[in-house]
Image (cartoon, helix red, strand yellow):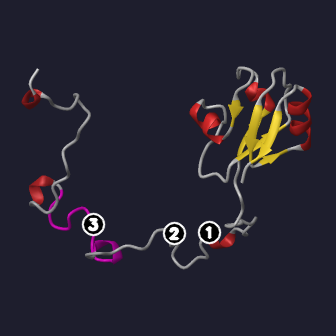
């Protein structure tokens, strides 16, 4: 196989419409734009969302909610996600992200451990926040919790 012999699959591409090339082409004279008017002009048309002067949909629908741009976002992990971690392991943000234990690891202010699930092995868990139930379950299983900023 040579690179100069490659071509798109049959039917994958279509020829461009050649406008303004005579009456015989079927796209001559007005170039499929009709006669005069806003849409026939160079640069004509309206901006996206313009509805002819009618109040646009984006302005008719009420605004709801609030997005706090100073909110702190933590990477959330439950105790049920730590079931297969070997005993004595130090579980911190780096360990969680390296082993894909959390569902979503984005720009985060650290790890937050929640108490859904059971702890059966003693682990050292380092996180920015712990729920009360998570802290109690980790310590009950013989592990330790450390709050890391």
Mark drawn on residue 33 = 3
Which SS class for mark 2?
loop
Pointer 1 residue? 58
Q: Is residue 148 above or below residue 7?
A: below
Residue at image x 22%, y 28%? Answer: 10
Q: Residue 18 appears in which quarter of the rendering? A: bottom left
Labels 1 and 2 touching (C-beta < 8 A): yes
- Label 3 packing within 10 angstroms: few (<14), some (14-19), many (20+): some
Q: How much space separates mark 1 and mark 2, taking CA atoms?
A: 8 Å
Is residue 67 one of those drawn in magenta? Answer: no
Q: Nearer the viewer, residue 66 or 68?
A: 68
Residue drawn 66% across the image and 36% down it: 103
The local crowd at label 2, few if under 14, some if 14 to 19, many if 20 or more residues have their Cα within 10 Å, is few
| Quadrant in the picture for the C terminus | bottom right
Q: Mark 2 highlights which residue?
A: 49
In the image, 125: left or right of 18?
right
Residues at marks 3 and 1 touching, judged by CB atoms closer than 8 Å: no
Q: Earlier in the sequence, mark 3 or mark 2?
A: 3
Q: Which residues are magenta?
A: 27-40
Q: Earlier in the sequence, mark 3 or mark 1?
A: 3
């Amino acid at each position: 196989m040579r690179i100069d012999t490659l071509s798109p699959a049959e039917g994958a591409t279509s020829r461009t419409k050649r406008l303004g090339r005579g009456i015989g082409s079927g796209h001559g004279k007005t170039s499929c734009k009709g006669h005069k008017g806003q849409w026939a002009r160079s640069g004509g048309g309206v901006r996206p969302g313009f509805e002819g002067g009618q109040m646009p949909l984006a302005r008719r629908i009420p605004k709801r909610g609030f997005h706090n741009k100073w909110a702190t976002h933590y990477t959330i992990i439950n105790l049920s996600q730590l079931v297969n971690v070997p005993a004595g392991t130090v579980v911190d943000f780096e360990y969680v992200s390296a082993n894909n234990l959390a569902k979503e690891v984005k720009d985060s202010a650290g790890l937050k451990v929640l108490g859904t699930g059971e702890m059966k092995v003693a682990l050292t868990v380092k996180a920015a926040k712990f729920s009360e139930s998570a802290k109690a379950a980790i310590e009950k299983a013989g592990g330790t919790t450390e709050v890391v900023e």
